[in-house]
Image (cartoon, helix red, strand yellow):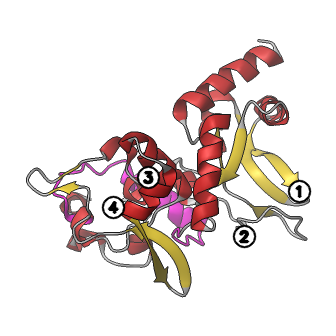
Amino acid sequence: MTSEDLMRRMERFIHSERHVTSARIARAFGGDPEGAVTCAENLVVAPGLSWEAGEALIALVADGRVFWSPITRTAYHLDGLFLDLPVSYVQRPFDEPTWLPAAFNSPRVHRRVMEAIRLMGGVGLGPEILDPDYGKRLYEIQSEIKCERCGRCCTLSNPISLEPQDVERLSAHLGISIRKTIQRYAGRVEVGGRGAWAMKRTSPCIFLDEASGLCKIHPTRPIVCRAFPLLSPRTVGGEPLAEWCPAARYL
């Protein structure tokens, strides 16, 4: 396969998948735990790629065929990648290796994400998982859980944090603008001294169908919802999972 063939395949994959982490790109096009793409001194934006995949991604970005934007590290946790590195959401040089979690997307989607970032003032709130081994254990357990669709996490979760990529995905699903999506469904919250954006109405979530216990926007639900019942601020913070998630009682 030529480098241009690899670039075309990677471009199609990123455009079709909307917001793609380098962990997913590595699985699809070649991974290397020691590989990484950097955008400034000591700043890693795409960890885990093979040399070939990394070169193809760099070329796509340089040609303006693919763009990247900051995303909560939870998106990488969902894809099974846990880095033992400090995290920054600002593009600048660092004295020590630092990770800037990023999502890769098409030019059109990128413009919409950047509008959401501008209106929201940055990336939202993600769980702090300081021990990668602990994160990997949670990731493995999550694959064993069979959701019973009880809707309790949609009722008990507060806040339900929102990332710019969540807003972009929800906006496209609902067919309304980024600004209207934020105005109608998002609100500012403070958790642990940090400001973030979250779903405006919870307990229950505005998108819970209480009759069926199902999510009305399930294909486009927020990243933090995809992380439940594990890899979330709630369980990472130490709350016993089995006390509120019926599916967890069988683990």
Mark 2 is surrounded, within 10 Å at the Cα level, by few (under 14), some (14 to 19) or many (20 or more) other residues, namely few
Residue ID for mark 3: 140
Ranked by sequence position, the earlier of labels 4 and 2 is 2
Task: Measure how far apart labels 3 and 1 are at the Cα level.
Answer: 33 Å
Quarter location, residue 155 = bottom left
Relative horizontal placement of residue 123, taking residue 136 as reference (left or right): right
- Residue labelled with disc 1: 40
Q: Is residue 249 visible?
A: yes
Relative to 168, residue 49 above or below: above
Quadrant that contains the N terminus? top right
Please state the extent of the stretch shown in magenta in the rendering.
125-153
Q: Earlier in the sequence, mark 1 or mark 2?
A: 1
In this rendering, does residue 223 appear at all?
no
Report which residue position mark 2 lands on.
86
Residues tagged 4 and 3 counted as in contact (Cβ below 8 A): no
Q: Earlier in the sequence, mark 3 or mark 2?
A: 2
